[in-house]
Amino acid sequence: MCPVLFELGPLTVHAYGVFVAAGYLLALGWTLAEARRLGLDQGKVPDLGLWVLLGGFLGARLLYVAIHPLYFWAHPLEIVMVWKGGLVLFGGVLSGALLGLVFMRKMGLPLRPWLDALAPGLVLGQGVGRLGCLSAGCCYGETTDLPWGLVFTDPDSLARPLGLALHPTQAYHAASDLAVFALLVAVRSRVKVPGRLMGLGLFLSAAFRLLIECFRADFRGELGPFTVTQVLALGILGLGAGLLVHKPKEKKA
C-alpha cells in the first residue's frame, strides 16, 4: 500500500514554537482548574508554571547538547540556537520537575496534592507540543511500508531520510499523551491517595515512550545497549510505580 504523502512547507516546519507555546498555555490553564477543584491555592500556579517552563526549556536543551558533545564542541555558539532543532523532552521533564519541586518546597506547598493537580495538564501540554515535533520533523521514525507512513520532503525538515516513508513517531507520542490525559481525567475523582494520579501518569507515559522508542530512528544518545531516553524512561517508570504503590503515612492527631 502507498504511504501517505506528508509534505512539510516552511510555515509548517517553523510552527514548532507555536505548538510548544500552545501546549504550555493549555497545561497552565488545566492546572489552574485542577488546583481549584482540589482546593489548592490557584495563585501559585502561574509562578509554578514559570519555574517548570524555565527549568524544562533549559534541561531539554542541555540534554540535547550533552548527547551531541562533539558537534557543539566544534560549534559552541549554536548551543543557544534552539530553533535549529535541539530539545530532548525527558531532559525538560526532569529539570522542570526539579525546579518545580524547589518552588513547592520554597513556598511550603503540599507535594502530593500538587503533583496530582499538575499531572493531567502536563500530559496534555506534552501531547500538544508533540505536534510541533511532527511539524518540524524531529523525533522521526524508522522507514516503513505501513499505509500511515509519512514522507517528509522539505529540506528544512529535521526528519531523515527525506523522500521515504517513515513511522510517524511524533504522532504516536501525541496520541499516547492525549490518551493518558483522557484516562487521568476519567479516573481522577476515584483516586483517593494523594500522589497516585501523578504516579499513574508517569508510569503510563514512560511505558508508551519505551514502546515508541522501538520505532524511533533519530539519535538519542547511547548508554551501552540502550539509548539515553530509554534509560530515562525506565527511571520515570520506576518513579511512577513508586508513587502508585507507596501510601503516605497518616499524620498523628
Image: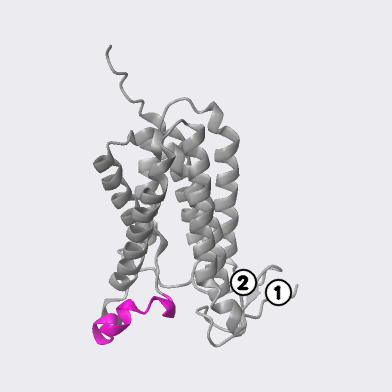
State the residue position of label 2: 144
Q: Position of residue 174 (x, y in %)?
A: 57, 58
Residue at x 41%, y 42% (from the top left corner): 43
Q: Which residues are magenta?
A: 72-85
| Kind of residue at badge 1 | Pro
Q: Position of residue 208 (x, y in %)?
A: 51, 51
| Kind of residue at badge 2 | Thr
Quadrant including the N terminus: bottom right
- Neighbour class for label 2 at 10 Å: few (<14), some, many (≥20)? some
Above or below, 173 against 154 in this view is above
Q: Is residue 210 shown in magenta?
A: no
Tag in front: 2 or 1: 1
Given contact means CB atoms under 8 Å apart, are the residues at marks 2 and 1 in contact? yes
Residue at x 69%, y 67% (from the top left corner): 148
Across the whole image, how many numbered discs are drawn on residues? Answer: 2
In depth, the one of 131 and 175 nearer the eye is 131
Q: Provide the major secondary structure of the magenta segment.
A: helix
Between discs 2 and 1, the one toward the N terminus: 1
Q: Position of residue 180 (x, y in %)?
A: 55, 46
Q: Is residue 79 shown in magenta?
A: yes
State the residue position of label 1: 3
Above or below, 140 against 109 in this view is below
Outermost residue to the front: 43
Q: Is residue 175 left or right of residue 191?
A: right
Residue at x 41%, y 29% (from the top left corner): 194
Quadrant including the C terminus: top left
Residue 227: tell me if it is visible. Answer: no
Q: Which mark is residue 217?
A: none
